Amino acid sequence: MARLAAARYGKDNVRVYKVHKDEKTGTQSVTEMTVCCLLEGQIETSYTEADNSVVVATDSIKNTIYIKAKEHPVNPPELYASHLGQHFLDKYPHITAAHIKVVVHRWTRINVDGAPHPHSFYRDGNETRNVDATVSREKGIELKSGLVGLSVLKSTGSAFHGFVRDEYTTLPETWDRILSTDVDATWTWKPFPNIAAVAAGVERFDSAFDAARTITLKTFSLDESASVQNTMYKMCEEILEAAPEVQSTGYSLPNKHYFEIDLSWHKGLKNTGKDAEVYAPQSGPNGLIKCEVARS
Ligand SMILES: O=c1[nH]c(=O)c2[nH]c(=O)[nH]c2[nH]1
């Protein structure tokens, strides 16, 4: 005998663009995002008995994503995701939870001759601002915000020594190495009982994003890093300090290795240790270091 142990369904990779036109100043602002929306509820029979009467078509879910983007602000993405998720609970009694993912892509205003252009933008990096929202009858609105894909490198100010040395170890200790990673940072909010609670003090979401980005870049730059583990923990501590309504925060960081190249075989060239200048960036394997830090 088989049984349906878990099920959710919906539309993924829905690309949405929204423009805001300030009629007074003639300035336009744009937001581009990719949305995923998956529903849970009393939908078992659609899987087990071919009963489509419980299915809100994924095509209708896609339409709803557009309509809610028209009806509500799409900024901050935490508020839009909450409105979108809440809609499915309000509209369909048999739906018990909506899982929304919003990925916001960068469009930064172009400066022309030192002045911000009213309607032209450029992509100044592949980093995205992300939100994972679960809106459920049981738990209200759960939000996890994030910053993903911010590539950083420091050419010194990073060490790694004192680690386990045994018959499996070849890595030399180092007091000066290159440190590079693609930042994936998340911060989880204390649950909100309803949309009104998300909307009250909505500035908290932009503030936390700005703080997380600034803290990440500043700590990465200034910390005399003993390890990825220790540097990321310091970042988490600071984010918790900066955002009181955040209950936990975490990072997932690849350690993108840059190997020294011994060139002494060529005319005695010195290119290792303090003489290292030319390195070989590695595509893989890479370290992968994760943590989640909560309030004690
Ligand atoms: O910061 C680091 N943490 C590790 O756990 C590790 N392991 C390794 O080989 N290099 C590094 N660097």
Image (cartoon, rainbow, N blue to C red):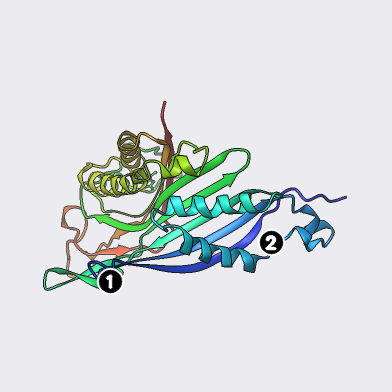
In the drawing, what numbered circle is on residue 56?
A: 2
The image quarter containing residue 55 is bottom right
Circle 2 or circle 1, nearest the eye = 2
Q: Is residue 144 visible?
A: yes
On screen, 279 above or below 287? below
- Earlier residue among tags 2 and 1: 2
Q: CA distance from mark 2 to mark 1?
A: 37 Å
The image quarter containing residue 270 is bottom left
Badge 1 amino acid: Phe
Rendered location of residue 188, percent (x, y) = 45, 41
Q: How many marks?
A: 2
43 horizontally vs 10: left or right: right
Mark 1 lies on a secondary structure that is strand
On screen, 284 above or below 163? below
Q: Quick one: quadrant of the C terminus?
A: top left
Badge 2 amino acid: Val
> Pointers 2 and 1 in contact (CB under 8 A)?
no
* The furthest residue to the right: 1
Q: Nearer the viewer, residue 188 or 287?
A: 188
Rendered location of residue 295, percent (x, y) = 41, 29
Mark 2 lies on a secondary structure that is loop
Q: Which residue is mark 1?
A: 121
Q: Residues within 10 Å of mark 2 (few under 14, many from 20)?
A: some
Q: Residues within 10 Å of mark 1 (few under 14, many from 20)?
A: some
Q: Is residue 166 visible?
A: no
